[in-house]
Amino acid sequence: MGLFDRIRGDDGPRVAFIGIDGVPYSMLAEHFDEFENLAAIAEEGSSGPIDSIVPPESSACWPALTTGVNPGETGVYGFQDREVGSYETYVPMGRDVQATRIWNRVHDADRRATVMNVPVTFPPQRDVQRMVSGFLSPSIDKAAYPDEFAGYLEGIDYKIDVNAKLGHDDDKADFIEDAHETLDRRHEAFTEYIEQDDWDLFFGVFMTTDRVNHFLFKDYEHDGEYKEEFLDFYRKVDQYIGEIRESLPDDVTLVVASDHGFTTLHHEVHFNEWLEQEGWLSYQDDDHEELGDIAEETKAYSLIPGRFYINKEGREPRGSVPEDEYEDVRDELQAELEALEGPDGTKVADRVVTREDAFRGDHSDIAPDLVVVPNHGFDLKAGFKGSDEVFDVGPRNGMHSFDNACLFVDEPDARIEDADLYDIAPTMLELLDVDYNRSEFDGSSLLTS
């Protein structure tokens, strides 16, 4: 029995969530005359800019958005995390998310969920009716559940992710074509299972928006060569969202959101190079490539994006900073980070946040000691292979921002003002009429009573 075969309202209200990774609200609002479907949701429902999380990295953001709690609870802080009591690092996957996802709450309420292309969900869960994992999944056959689902996806040339390497070319034509093909196949699959599956929660993410922003956002903001191609891509995104909205029955509420904002990238900041130049970081030998190569005299090191760890005795294997000096050393590093200026004299950091202010929960043992939330234009890097310069320029011209993520709720009684990423999960649970304990979330429902 498909969605349209159900007796309307027999199992309670339903929600369709469409993620548009990394899309800033201001960009959409500036073009509501062209993006008429998103404009219609804004006019007939509720919309506005919302804040992301610290740090605004997709690998940390999607676990936070889908659970409603901070990285101290999810246990995922970025694209790369470190092992407890070790310099070993790993790339977090779905199994590393320690908090309860919204679709698990739906399942526990004897309702049904279809989940497609959400980052940090590999391997696919088997306690939902259908899932294909997103970003970082190795292959479709391993990312899809049930098994026959993979056959359908392979049959339509579904792509888990765009080929981002094409974006490194000066000529972006192949990258843009690949982005459109990836978006087309994603929409085709979403449409198929929105209609075919009997779901209470449909949760799908277009991640290609983030990829396009990384390589074309400066063209958009500064009237570059590919500005029109950028807008053409978003006209299609808006069209697809409109088609999905039009297909939904009356008892389904559509929610559209991004996990962080975006802005033009002017400088990459190689923070481990800066730490080495300033005497905070040293290596055991010249042939260093990873975190485990740091020397015992190191006082601090960095992981992306803008996460700083004090090399603390008793916590790090070769910790050099005694417990009784930790606070003073951290304060000194925080002051230096707050004072750091880019080549044009602009402060790199909008603010520097301590672990106590940013993170709380049972899984905060690998939390960074400090996190730099950068000013627009400074993309924070942290490789260990060494870089000749602290400030550099790479192939990308767009970067994530903490502010200016977007949220659209096809419900006029939603309060978007002062909202952030943590509010989305409890809002959807209330829309679904699924009971939950408000104390379990860092956010709260945006629905006005």
Image: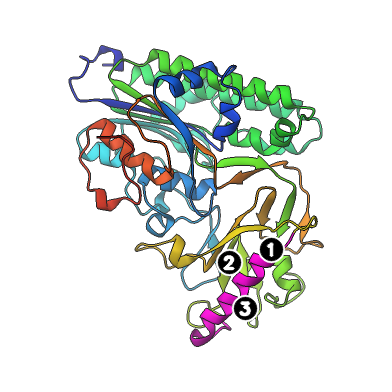
At label 1, the amino acid type is Phe
Could you tell me if the residues under marks 2 and 1 are in contact, i.e. CB atoms within 8 Å? yes
How far separated are the C-alphas under marks 3 and 2? 10 Å
Per the rendering, the mark at residue 271 is 1
Q: Secondary structure at mark 1?
A: helix
- Marks 2 and 1, how far apart in space? 9 Å
Amino acid identity at mark 2? Phe
Residue 244 colored in magenta in the image: no
The x, y position of residue 95, in whole percent, is: 40, 51
Location of residue 309 in the rendering, given as x and y in whole percent from the top left corner = 56, 70
Q: Amino acid at mark 3?
A: Lys
Would residue 136 appear left or right of 387 to someone viewing this image? left
Horizontal and vertical percent position of residue 79: 55, 52
Q: Is residue 312 above or below residue 37?
A: below
Q: Tag 2, which secondary structure? A: strand
Q: Nearer the viewer, residue 194 or 124?
A: 194
**Which residue is at a point 80% across and 57% down the rendered structure image?**
343
Q: Which residue position holds label 3? A: 299
407 relative position to 11: left or right: right
Q: What residue sits right under mark 2 in the picture?
A: 308
Dot 2 crowding, Cα within 10 Å, few <14, some 14–19, many 20+: many
Decide: is 197 above or below 246: below
Dot 3 crowding, Cα within 10 Å, few <14, some 14–19, many 20+? many
Query: Farthest left residue?
Result: 10
Q: Earlier in the sequence, mark 2 or mark 1?
A: 1
Does any portion of residue 400 appear in the rendered image?
A: yes
